[in-house]
Image (cartoon, rainbow, N blue to C red):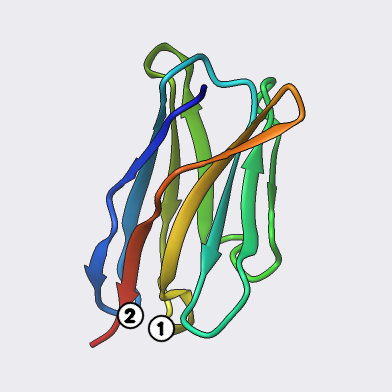
Amino acid sequence: QVQLVESGGGLVQPGGSLRLSCTASISILNMAWYRQAPGHRREWVAAISSGGVTNYDDSVKGRFDISKDDAKNTVYLQMNSLKPEDTAVYYCKTVRRNMDYWGEGTLVTVSS
């Protein structure tokens, strides 16, 4: 059983920054961030592989940065130049032995 705990969400003004964290109960091999806005489907945002290779959705490329600290079993999502359309619940997800494990999510609200 893998447990993931997100933190770092909150209310921020447009143009501001937030850093989300996702701490796993075991060593991280891969991790992805997803988000789900009200009335919308959950969508993929960014991912990092065990070797540190990163990928981003075009909507966040150049604004968001995913990184990890293996010693802390933690993955981060640094979000800069936030826009109101970034408002969503953000979830982290990892895959182990062909099973998906999700955190419970952290709410990010971008509003003035």
Task: Give percent across and percent down for residue 66.
Answer: 53, 43
Rendered position, 9 above or below 65: below
Viewer-proximal residue among 33 and 83: 33
Instruction: Inspect the image, locate mark 2, and give the three-letter code of the amino acid beneath it.
Output: Pro
Task: Give percent across and percent down for residue 23.
Answer: 38, 30
Q: Are marks 2 and 1 in contact (CB under 8 Å)?
A: yes
* Placement of the C terminus among the 4 image quadrants: bottom left
Which residue is rendered at x = 25% and y = 71% of the image?
12
Viewer-proximal residue among 7 and 49: 7
Quarter holding residue 24: top left
Badge number at residue 84: 1
Which residue is rendered at x = 33% and y = 77% of the image?
110
Cα separation between marks 2 and 1 = 6 Å
Rendered position, 90 above or below 110: above
Rendered position, 26 above or below 58: above
Rendered position, 40 above or below 6: below
Question: Crowdedness of circle 2 by 10 Å Cα count: few (<14), some, many (20+)?
Answer: some
Task: Give percent across and percent down for residue 56.
Answer: 67, 54
Asked if residue 60 lies left or right of residue 106, the reply is: right
Name the front one of labels 2 and 1: 1
Instruction: Inspect the image, locate mark 1, and give the three-letter code of the amino acid beneath it.
Output: Pro
Badge number at residue 14: 2
Viewer-proximal residue among 17 and 101: 101
Q: Secondary structure at mark 2?
A: loop
Which residue is rendered at x = 65% and y = 43% of the image?
47
